[in-house]
């Protein structure tokens, strides 16, 4: 993994990380952002931060997130729109959990096009529905740093201040999986038709998935 880390140099790119809940989008997006010097934009994380700060946006989306229901497109797109100027002036970004349907994907393209930019690659981390439940029920997040752990696969240190996400209960997870199949899977063709989609097996170790992602990025974006 280390040699790959050293051989990928970021210039400017926009990546769209896609996958079912629990596939490892957040875990991998944080690693790639750090390695490639990109901004990490997780709409889910931004919503959760607003909920914990009790902002107006947080109060509007709290129940939706707790139920595992998608936030309406207009609110979500506005959230990204507010960040786009800052992102296009940096070295690029990894979007994690956005876009999540065709309408959001088209909105992102429109936003980027206004700045003569576009999506460079859309890695899709695949994970079977049966593995998703185990991943999400064992997930813990550090309240202070936001680092993601798993009780079995990536255990938190004893002194970590971890919590369980309120949408990681079994029933809520099942609803989120259904949403993924209904809303996100139909979006995949949008990226596949432009040869931007690349599938990664999420049922490997965290390091193996990172290596596979970096190989694909090196081969496709820097080729
Ligand atoms: P969001 O936060 O985006 O949740 P999600 O898409 O359901 O994805 P998760 O964060 O649950 O999983 P992940 O793929 O990031 O996996 P992770 O790396 O944590 O969205 C939450 C909510 O916000 C939505 O339900 C919706 O309400 C709203 N929302 C957000 N964006 C929206 C949008 N665009 N439109 C509308 N609404 C939106 O990994 C999971 C666990 O597995 C961890 O414990 C990790 O340690 C472990 N793990 C990871 N990789 C591996 C591995 N390879 N092997 C073993 N364990 C692993």
Image (spheres, rainbow, N blue to C red):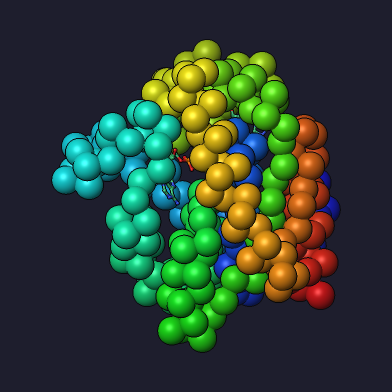
Horizontal relation, residue 95 to residue 76: left or right: right
As drawn, 42 above or below 102:
above
Horizontal relation, residue 77 to residue 173: left or right: left
Would residue 35 be seen by someone viewing this image from the given angle? no
Residue toward you, 117 or 155: 117
Q: How many discs mark residues in the rendered view?
A: 0
Which quarter of the figure has residue 79? bottom left
Where residue 46 appears, x then y in whole percent? 36, 47
Where residue 62 appears, x then y in whole percent? 27, 35
Residue toward you, 204 or 222: 204
Which quarter of the figure has residue 137? top right
Where residue 212 appears, x then y in whole percent? 80, 49
Where residue 168 appears, x then y in whole percent? 48, 23
Question: Which residue is depicted at the point 43% across and 26% down?
Answer: 167
Would residue 136 be seen by someone viewing this image from the given angle? yes
Residue toward you, 134 or 54: 134
Question: Which residue is depicted at the point 71% across and 73% down?
Answer: 194
Which quarter of the figure has residue 76? bottom left
Residue toward you, 69 or 55: 69
As drawn, 140 above or below 55:
above
As drawn, 192 above or below 58:
below
As drawn, which residue projects farthest toward the left? 56
Question: Which residue is depicted at the point 45% across and 83% down?
Answer: 115
């Amino acid at each position: 993994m280390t040699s790959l880390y050293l051989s990928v140099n970021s210039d400017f790119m926009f990546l769209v990380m896609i996958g079912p809940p629990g596939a490892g989008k957040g875990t991998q997006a944080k690693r790639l952002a750090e390695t490639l010097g990109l901004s990490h934009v997780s709409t889910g994380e931004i919503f959760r931060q607003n909920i914990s700060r009790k902002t107006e946006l947080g109060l509007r989306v709290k129940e939706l997130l707790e139920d595992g229901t998608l936030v309406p497109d207009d609110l979500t797109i506005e959230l990204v729109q507010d960040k786009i100027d800052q992102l296009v002036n940096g070295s690029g970004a990894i979007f994690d959990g956005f876009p999540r349907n065709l309408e959001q994907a088209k909105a992102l393209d429109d936003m980027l096009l206004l700045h003569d930019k576009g999506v460079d690659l859309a890695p899709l981390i695949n994970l079977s529905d049966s593995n998703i439940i185990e991943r999400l029920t064992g997930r813990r997040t550090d309240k202070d740093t936001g680092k993601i752990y798993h009780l079995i696969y990536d255990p938190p240190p004893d002194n970590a201040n971890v919590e369980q996400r309120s949408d990681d209960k079994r029933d809520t997870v099942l609803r989120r999986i259904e949403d993924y199949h209904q809303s996100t899977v139909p979006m995949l063709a949008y990226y596949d038709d432009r040869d931007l989609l690349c599938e990664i097996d999420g049922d490997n170790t965290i390091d193996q998935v990172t290596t596979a992602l970096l190989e694909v990025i090196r081969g496709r974006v820097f080729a």
